[in-house]
């Protein structure tokens, strides 16, 4: 009986995780399409599927619901919460990796003053809010917790908005990002202090809080400082050790994550929140040369745990309580008051350090949205018993509403191209260099060469976790940004560094040009080409599914290859052709690189192109044949034109291989050459498909 119950619990946990991940992913993508952070959709997934909503409905095999409401401090099972706890460690570890400690240590007054202003006013609101509105005493550790939540920001939301409008390297963008690092770091520190004070329990006055909490706080603080110093001091040796384990790209992330988990556990045992240990390890490794490798390899891990983390956070929220005045109004009021404090506290000092009203407004609005740090602090507070479920719901309402309100306002403020700095002859302005290259392959070459060039000059390079490639390049107080958007390369930085940026770009282009010219001298070995023409194997493509009589030219009367390509292109289904000129140019360009003649009279001119929206083909029979530089040096009389979308994941290569296999059969070739109507040619391919017994993974759209 015990074994059966255990099996049922494991099965239930697996089903919970699987369903939550799928729905959270879909909801996250939906939120992004609406211009909102993915965490909004992921949190709402947990609210809907959680124990306070659909999760408690009885189902066959689950008498108490798919996600039953648990008794005790946690509304979900300890097993499910464990995944959230690991997700919190993973996420904060990644936040630490994004933190450039040396850059923080050298922050200028231009970023420090708005950060301190925002910290002081929002922290004051966090202290007064639970006292004035919720009736807590000044001696209660809850007020420290509210102060930390009020101080926190959302770097993920800010980075996405700034990147979308190409404003990461504006003066306002740099101040928002750098001051946010300072504020989130302090918020996590406040959580550590709160956890230390928690052990002393509520006391009647601030003096009592200090007297009761100091010994425990000092102990926890020593653990924190010594542990953090240990990791910082040995970070270079840790990085070297990680690289010695094996190929860095393959294994560096695993021991790095293991180290974060180890320190998280030790900090938790010492009375300090586990995420403090994760943040310390991440911040320490951020100053090493393995940080890029660790970040890249951690993305799949984060892709699993982070949506799960936010969804499980949502399960802590009771919808019925959420809409009650005590929770909804209090949470909205907290968001409004703390948001105004952030706005005023950051904007007013920004005016004193050279920003005009618009620039100061942008900086203030950029700090309003809270996000991942606030929610994680809330879950840690509930799990530790520091706050109850109702207080967590207030934190959740504050976080979500601050994102819904703050994000659009921040985006609207930075849309304008007006300068946010007070104009002066000595004012430092950003410079932006844009370069359009022929295709995305060249853009990738330029990106890689530029990043290697900066790295060799001692810069620290890391990629922000965005949908498109956005890189921050830093050394000391110098910061550049590199953005790749399709075939456009954008390099930006301080106008005083324009010479460096243009020189770096020039030298990179010279290097890439040399590489490309060397690649054009690369010849395709004849045995490789012949192997493609003679290859055998299984395939699941039915060529006849892509072919109709209107796509067959019988006969195809042309004088050369280019004429054949143009006439066959005209036969392609018009619903699939978006740009005929581009399609023809791409196929001809591919043909000029290396002839597409195979063996036995078959030629397959083809290309991946933006000129079509779906994979399409056309067939022509040329009496006497044409020279397509065939493998067997014979003229090609059966010409099959194939075009696929450039970014399609369709079976382009499988189709090419299937064509070679079908027309290797002498009977099939003879039947096509002797066919009198296009219908007969289509029937030959249909018969050949049946002979190969191909399955149908999907069926192409037919001519309408």
Image (cartoon, rainbow, N blue to C red):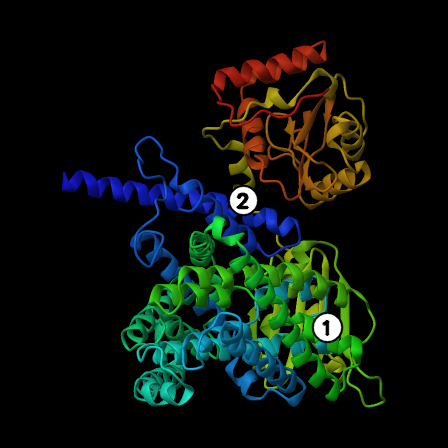
Residue 480: image location, x then y, percent: 66, 76
Q: Is residue 213 above or below residue 660?
A: below
Which dot marks residue 362?
1
Residue pictured at 57% horizontal, 22% vertical: 663
Q: Is residue 543 above or below residue 68?
A: above
Q: Secondary structure at mark 2?
A: helix
Q: Quadrant of the C terminus?
A: top right
Q: CA distance from mark 1 to mark 2?
A: 31 Å
Q: Secondary structure at mark 1?
A: helix
Residue at which label 2 appears: 26
Depth check: 417 or 115 in front?
Answer: 115
Depth check: 223 or 470 in front?
Answer: 223
Residue pictured at 77% horizontal, 21% vertical: 556
Q: Which quarter of the picture shows residue 466? A: bottom right
Within-10-Å neighbours for mark 2: few <14, some 14–19, many 20+: some
Residue 424: image location, x then y, percent: 85, 88
Within-10-Å neighbours for mark 1: few <14, some 14–19, many 20+: many
Depth check: 431 or 633 in front?
Answer: 431
Residue 94: image location, x then y, percent: 47, 67
Please give left or right for residue 257 compared with residue 447 in the image.
Answer: left
Label 1 or label 2, whichever lies nearer to me, is 1
- Mark 1 vs 2: CB contact within 8 A: no
Q: Earlier in the sequence, mark 1 or mark 2?
A: 2
Please give left or right for residue 659 compared with residue 678 in the image.
Answer: left
Q: Quadrant of the N terminus?
A: top left
Q: Which quarter of the picture shows residue 330? A: bottom right
Depth check: 586 or 437 in front?
Answer: 437
Which dot marks residue 589?
none
| Residue 569 at least partly seen | yes
| Residue 636 at least partly seen | no
Q: Is residue 196 above or below residue 667?
A: below
Residue 324: image location, x then y, percent: 53, 53
């Amino acid at each position: 009986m015990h074994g059966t119950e255990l099996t049922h619990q494991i099965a239930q946990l697996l089903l919970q995780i699987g369903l939550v991940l799928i729905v959270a992913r879909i909801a996250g993508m939906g939120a992004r399409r609406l211009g909102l952070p993915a965490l909004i959709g992921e949190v709402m997934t947990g609210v809907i599927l959680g124990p306070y909503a659909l999760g408690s409905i009885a189902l066959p095999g689950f008498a108490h619901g798919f996600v039953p409401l648990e008794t005790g401090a946690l509304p979900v099972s300890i097993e499910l919460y464990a995944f959230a706890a690991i997700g919190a460690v993973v996420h904060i570890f990644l936040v630490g990796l994004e933190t450039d400690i040396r850059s923080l240590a050298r922050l200028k007054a231009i970023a420090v003053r708005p950060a301190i202003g925002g910290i002081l006013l929002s922290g004051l609101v966090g202290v007064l809010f639970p006292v004035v509105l919720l009736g807590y005493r000044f001696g209660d550790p809850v007020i420290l917790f509210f102060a930390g939540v009020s101080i926190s920001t959302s770097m993920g939301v800010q980075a996405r908005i700034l990147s979308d409008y190409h404003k990461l390297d504006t003066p306002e963008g740099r101040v928002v990002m750098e001051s946010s690092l300072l504020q989130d770091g302090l918020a996590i520190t406040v959580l550590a202090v709160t956890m230390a004070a928690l052990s002393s329990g509520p006391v009647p006055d601030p003096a009592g809080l200090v007297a009761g909490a100091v010994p425990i706080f000092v102990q926890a603080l020593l653990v924190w400082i010594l542990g953090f110093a240990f990791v910082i001091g040995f970070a270079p040796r840790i990085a070297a050790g990680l690289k010695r384990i094996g190929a860095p790209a393959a294994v560096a992330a695993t021991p790095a994550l293991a180290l974060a988990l180890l320190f998280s556990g030790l900090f938790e045992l010492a009375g300090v929140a586990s995420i403090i240990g994760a943040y310390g390890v991440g911040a320490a490794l951020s100053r090493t040369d393995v940080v890029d490798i660790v970040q890249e390899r951690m993305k799949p891990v984060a892709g699993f745990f982070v949506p799960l983390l936010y969804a499980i956070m949502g399960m802590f929220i009771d919808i019925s309580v959420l809409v009650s005045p005590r929770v909804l109004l209090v949470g909205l009021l907290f968001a409004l008051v703390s948001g105004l404090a952030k706005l005023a506290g950051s904007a007013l000092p920004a005016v004193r350090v050279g920003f005009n009203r618009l620039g100061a407004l942008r900086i203030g609005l950029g700090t309003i949205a809270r996000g991942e740090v606030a929610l994680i602090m809330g879950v840690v507070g509930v799990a530790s018993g520091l706050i109850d479920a109702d207080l967590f719901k207030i934190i959740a309402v504050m976080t979500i509403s601050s994102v819904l309100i703050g994000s659009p306002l921040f985006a609207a403020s930075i849309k304008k191209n007006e300068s946010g700095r007070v104009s002066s002859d000595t004012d430092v302005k950003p410079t932006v260099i844009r370069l359009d290259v022929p295709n995305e392959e060249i853009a990738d070459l330029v990106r890689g060469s530029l990043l290697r060039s900066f790295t060799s000059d001692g810069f620290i390079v890391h990629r922000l976790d965005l949908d498109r490639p956005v890189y921050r390049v830093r050394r000391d107080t110098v910061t550049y940004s590199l953005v790749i958007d399709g075939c456009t390369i954008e390099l930006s930085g301080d106008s005083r560094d324009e010479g460096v940026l243009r020189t770096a770009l020039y030298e990179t282009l010279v290097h890439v040009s040399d590489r490309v010219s060397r690649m054009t001298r690369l010849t395709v070995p004849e045995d490789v080409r012949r192997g493609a023409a003679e290859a055998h194997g299984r395939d699941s493509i039915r060529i006849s599914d892509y072919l109709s009589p209107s796509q067959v030219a019988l006969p195809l009367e042309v004088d050369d290859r280019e004429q054949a390509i143009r006439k066959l292109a005209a036969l392609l289904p018009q619903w699939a052709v978006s740009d005929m000129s581009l399609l023809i140019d791409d196929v001809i360009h591919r043909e000029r690189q290396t002839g597409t003649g195979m063996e036995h009279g078959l030629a397959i001119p083809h290309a991946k192109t933006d000129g079509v929206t779906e994979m399409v083909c056309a067939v022509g029979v040329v009496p006497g044949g044409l020279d397509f530089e065939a493998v067997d040096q014979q003229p090609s009389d059966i010409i099959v034109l194939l075009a696929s979308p450039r970014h399609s994941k369709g079976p382009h290569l499988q189709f090419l291989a299937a064509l070679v296999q079908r027309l290797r059969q002498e009977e099939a070739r003879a039947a096509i050459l002797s066919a009198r109507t296009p219908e007969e040619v289509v029937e030959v391919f249909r018969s050949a498909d049946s002979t190969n017994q191909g399955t149908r993974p999907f069926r192409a759209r037919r001519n309408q």
